[in-house]
Image (cartoon, coloured by chain):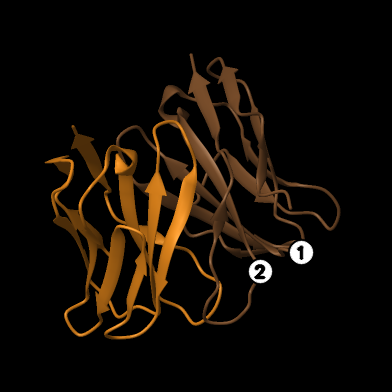
Chain colours: A brown, B orange
Amino acid sequence: NAGVMQNPRHLVRRRGQEARLRCSPMKGHSHVYWYRQLPEEGLKFMVYLQKENIIDESGMPKERFSAEFPKEGPSILRIQQVVRGDSAAYFCASSLPTGIQETQYFGPGTRLLVL
Amino acid sequence: ELKVEQNPLFLSMQEGKNYTIYCNYSTTSDRLYWYRQDPGKSLESLFVLLSNGAVKQEGRLMASLDTKARLSTLHITAAVHDLSATYFCAVSYTGTASKLTFGTGTRLQVTL
């Protein structure tokens, strides 16, 4: 039973380039979350998606960042025109809403380094 | 705005000793989670606590929740080196699937 998968695991970009991060949720999971972790800090919520819908994007920067979770395929977090401050670990989590006991399961993360 | 605070931020303890990590949160919450993260790794779910007075135990770790005090504790009994990691508490506060607000993390180092 594969867990949450993310790729790439490491990504290096120069300032101004685009970064695309992919997340495949656990089988049967319909909810996807993206979080960002800066060095030595906790995770910060970015966006919550269900298939073809953005449910909550209150943690997403207003510019340059976008996310999608299409009907088919992985969820994508896209960062346009990256800056050094975007360097962080980006984690995806998925969940299967089973009521009050719902738990988010995290992927291995993508470590983005902007040069 | 929901705030989640943990203390201590860093904890160095000897094997065999007991200690407690504290997690305070600012707003009424539906659920409280504890996660473990090893360096450079992802987060591993440890506990989900739902109701006042809830207590869960797994091995040397025991988590409890006091919703009236908005406080959760993670108690470590007779620590072993394998428990060295960073521990995060996280809170969600809406009825169903929702974002988690994480604490700052407690970096635990267990020494021989």
* Label 2 crowd bin: few (<14), some (14–19), many (20+), radius 10 Å: some
Q: Residue furthest right?
A: A72
The answer to whether tags 1 and 2 share a subunit is yes
Residue A13's disc is none
Residue under the image location 76 percent in, 64 percent down: A28
Percent position of residue B112, x then y: 18, 32
**Badge 2: chain ID:** A
**Is residue B78 found left or right of A1 in the rendered image?**
left
Question: What is the x, y in percent for residue A113?
Answer: 50, 21
Mark 1 / mark 2, whichever is N-terminal: 1
Name the residue located 34 percent from the left edge and 40 percent from the top edge.
Answer: B82
Residue A69 or residue A64, whichever sits in front: A69
State the residue at coordinates (76%, 62%). Answer: A51
**Amino acid type, residue under disc 1 in the picture:** Gly
Q: For the residues marked 1 and 2, what is the alpha-carbon distance in whole angstroms?
A: 7 Å
Q: Which residue is mark 1?
A: A28
